[in-house]
Image (cartoon, rainbow, N blue to C red):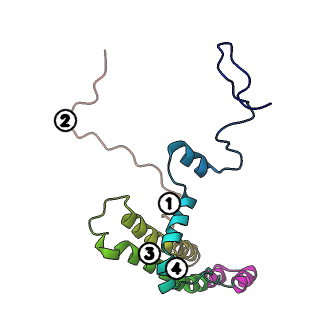
Amino acid sequence: MPALTERSPRGFPLRDPDFELYDNVGRDADQIAAARYGTATRSDLLRWAKRDAKPFLADHPLPDQPLPAPDVDPYLTALAAAKTPAEVSAVTQHLLDAAQPALGAVSEVLVAIARRGGRNRFAEPGSPPKMLMSAASQVLAPLNLADLADLTVLRAEYDPAPRPPAPPQDRTAPSPPAVPPGTPGPKRAR
């Protein structure tokens, strides 16, 4: 049955309910929102930027492959054999020391992007330079948090907080202070 062949009681053509001008099947939320509001999707923006950056990338080639992932097997093997907090800390600290140069380099590049052309100096909160500066600091945040967790475990093991002194067992509660002579006692209601 072709679309628009049926008519309403007033004579207007009815659409086939199985046919929509904009069918959302196979589209993601970004595409649906973009179609609804008439904006570009993330994929559109990245595709256009990639197209426009081709001459630049021809002059300044960048690696196409992701940065190599570190081999974590030695850390996982050592962790499986660790029995004490000191041994777990050794694994943690070696991992953090190994990851710091790569994450530090990512942070450094993000800061350079944010500062490009001095546009970060008077940038408003929530602007791209401020977001990039925030991302640069957050790249290193997992290292700091993991180090803090490791030190907390070590402090509990090697330097626990002192316990508050226990009250002596043989003492009784002190008696109330004596009323000084010549002062009236408590008043009673009549």
User: Nearer the viewer's eye, disc 2 or disc 1?
Assistant: 1
Q: Residue at x 62, y 79 (%)?
A: 66
Q: Which residues are magenta?
A: 72-92
Q: Amino acid at mark 1?
A: Pro
Q: Are marks 4 and 3 in contact (CB under 8 Å)?
A: no
User: Which residue position is annotated with label 3?
Assistant: 110
Q: Amino acid at mark 2?
A: Gly
Magenta highlight: main SS? helix
The residues tagged by marks 4 and 2 sit, at their Cα atoms, a distance apart of 78 Å
Q: Residue furthest top?
A: 9
Q: Amino acid at mark 3?
A: Leu
Q: Which label was assigned to residue 168?
A: 1
Q: Position of residue 43 (x, y in %)?
A: 57, 60
User: Which residue position is annotated with label 4?
Assistant: 103
The answer to whether residue 112 is left or right of residue 169 is left
Q: Amino acid at mark 4?
A: Leu
Q: Residues within 10 Å of mark 3 (few under 14, many from 20)?
A: many
User: Nearer the viewer's eye, disc 4 or disc 3?
Assistant: 3
Task: Say which label, 2 or 1, has the lower sequence index.
Answer: 1
Q: Residue furthest right?
A: 1
User: Which residue position is annotated with label 2?
Assistant: 182
Q: Is residue 121 above or below residue 58?
A: above
The residues tagged by marks 2 and 1 sit, at their Cα atoms, a distance apart of 36 Å
